[in-house]
Image (cartoon, rainbow, N blue to C red):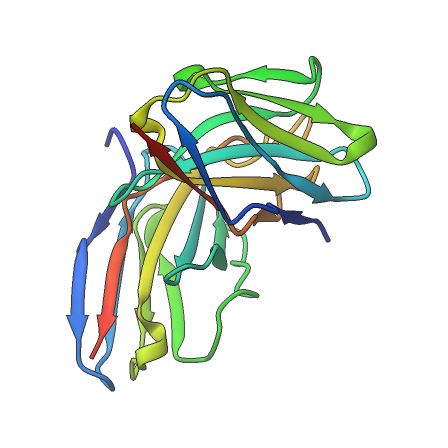
Amino acid sequence: GAGVSQSPSNKVTEKGKDVELRCDPISGHTALYWYRQSLGQGLEFLIYFQGNSAPDKSGLPSDRFSAERTGGSVSTLTIQRTQQEDSAVYLCASSLGVRRATYAPRGYTFGSGTRLTVV
Amino acid sequence: AQSVTQPDIHITVSEGASLELRCNYSYGATPYLFWYVQSPGQGLQLLLKYFSGDTLVQGIKGFEAEFKRSQSSFNLRKPSVHWSDAAEYFCAVADNYGQNFVFGPGTRLSVLP
């Protein structure tokens, strides 16, 4: 598509329920990132997928969080047994990855995010 | 690992006034630097980026930024602010392998009519 698409745009869930957030990156973008932005906070890195390499999961805050990327395209972020502190905007971004010759990273394109509210 | 600071949490300027948003980074090698803008209810949009070459970088919407290695800074500027520039601005740095993107905490810009 023309941009990074995220769904749903808004999600309200009860504490303890599981949620799935979807990200559809720009076609051909090999790198995909998940971030979350809590109210009044900066962006917090969650997880990074690059091509067929093992994902960098170093930012996932707990084992309740997991993500997968099927076929190198669509990604799903799953939060199990949601807690109120999980309430945030979850942003997905994709990029062409790095230029092999110079390792210069390309800029991201971000989706509009999913606003998750846990009540 | 690299890090980014944006010393100003909130800045208010009058429409038509000039603007400078500060960004300082910490990284041992030449960083790759970015400025993003997030308007209310919108996703992040890339304003400009610096990889190498000319240290004064021109971006979209009339923004520019200057990379100053001696000061470890990459400040964002605009000569005349418009009301539509009210948004949150994020500075970001990536390492020279593009493996780690770190964002600053953001600066919220308010524009007075």
Query: Which x, y percent locates residue B82?
Result: 34, 22
Query: Which x, y percent locates residue A23?
Result: 29, 50
Q: Give above or below for A96 relative to A56.
A: above
For the point 28% across and 33% down, the residue is A3
Query: Which x, y percent locates residue A36?
Result: 40, 59
Point out the image quarter for the C terminus of chain B.
top left
In the image: residue A27, left or right of residue A29: left
For the point 49% across and 59% down, the residue is A44
Q: Quadrant of residue A26?
A: top left
Q: How many numbered marks have been drawn onto this rendered protein structure?
A: 0
Query: Which x, y percent locates residue A111?
Result: 31, 43
Q: Give above or below for B2 relative to A90.
A: above
- In this view, the residue in front, A39 or A17, is A39
- In this view, the residue in front, B18 or B26, is B18
- In this view, the residue in front, B89 or A80, is B89
Q: Give above or below for B13 relative to A117.
A: above
For the point 39% across and 27% down, the residue is B14
For the point 41% across and 55% down, the residue is A34
- In this view, the residue in front, B2 or A59, is B2
